[in-house]
Image: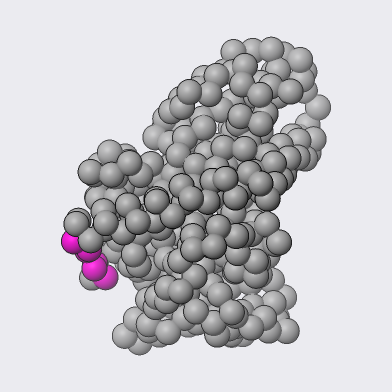
Amino acid sequence: MHVQSVVKLAAVGCAVLATAHPGHQEKRANSDLLGFKANMRRGLENCASKFERSGLNARAEARRRALVDLHRRRLAARDTDSVLNKSHLVTGSDVTPDSSASEVFANTSTCILNPEGETGPYYVPGEYIRSDVREDQSGVPVVIEGQFINVETCEPITDLYWDIWNCNATGVYSGLVANGNGNTDDTSNLNATFLRGIQKTDSDGVVTFESLFPGHYSGRTTHHHMVAHLDVTVLDNNTITGGTVAHIGQLFWDQDLINDVEATYPYNTNTVTLTTNAEDRVFSDETENSDSDPVLNYVYLGDSLDDGLFGWVTVAVNVSATYDPNYSFVYTSSGGVAVDDDSSTPGGGQSGGSQPSGGQPSGSQPTGGQF
């Protein structure tokens, strides 16, 4: 089986990067950051043979291939042979269109986690445990797989809860009302939950989400946010509480892919100037004088962006680390609630009722701010 069976490849490395938000900046000294990365990379190099012996790489290959096959089968009927036989663009790696599936899906491109990043005010504790976070939002579908590895033991991290969120196709985050986040008169967005969710890793340290490709807003490149929770308690209302946060960070996409997505509807209705990866301060800070590559591995699931993307990342975590994510809003049984003074205690477990269907807020063009 060849990579043509998954249509289009961009097998590139990645790094989970610290976030950046005005008023929440905690820049690290470059020397400390680079030293941290060097130590982490040496630890990961020692893990490589263990991954192979334990079958972790083989299971990752089979799982990723099966996920792509599953989501391709959900597409409308098409001329499969014409898709399989066409030439497809490959960027960012030595993988060619004739590479075997094992060369594609066994690619770990393990991420090195930097010290704590700033969460910013757009993190909302209290979100639901769920795999599909799309609700009724429109945009390019993405299936994102994350595999979490303990950098000290080289073992998968089971029972880690991966909290992920991003803005919608026109640059608006759910769960808050704030300047720079769409129409501030649309108070219904405070109770919205779209494109936010939490899931627990399995025995291989794996979580898979169905989400949408993020849009953009002023001053930041396209990105997903993430928080990794350990030792949490799951409540009856399908949320989490307690535990510790072992990582706060971001995930990014290839710039060529971003450009292609931004040319499609509804992304192209956003009149805010697009900030590229090359222009983004966070992206630049994390890749300068470093071999980090802050871009997800990905393949196309079908013949076009409408069919969706499958992206994957392997994340190495120091489970002994503990961080305090900041937030200005929390989701409760009564909906979204603003909190005072940017709380630094991890929230969650406060929402109640059924999981809402959500909705796209009106006036979706953001006007400024870096989050």
Can residue 176 be seen here?
A: no
Is residue 79 inside the magenta stretch?
no
In this rendered view, identify the residue nearer to me: 164 or 171. 164
Choose top left, top right, bottom left or bottom right for residue 300: top right
| Residue depicted at x 73% and y 84% | 236
Measuring from the top left, give residue 244's x and y in whole percent.
50, 79
Residue at 76%, 15% (x, y): give it. Answer: 81
- In the picture, the quarter occupied by the C terminus is bottom left
Magenta residues: mostly which secondary structure? loop
Visual colour scheme: one colour
Q: Which region of the structure is painted magenta? A: 24-29
Asked if residue 130 shows in the view, the reply is: yes
- Image: 108 above or below 202: above
- Seen in the image, is 71 located left or right of residue 295? right
Indicate left or right for 303 with 189 as reference: right
Identify whether 107 is placed above or below 219: above
Looking at the rendering, which quadrant does residue 326 occupy? Answer: bottom left
Residue 182 or residue 175, whichever sits in front: 175
Where is residue 189? Give x, y as percent.
50, 68
Front-most of residues 287 and 58? 58
- Where residue 217 appears, x then y in whole percent? 35, 51
Query: For this view, does 50 lie left or right of residue 18?
Result: right
362 over 56 or under it: above or below: below
Q: Position of residue 148 (x, y in %)?
A: 56, 58
Residue at the spot 48% in from the left edge and 23% down from the top edge: 94
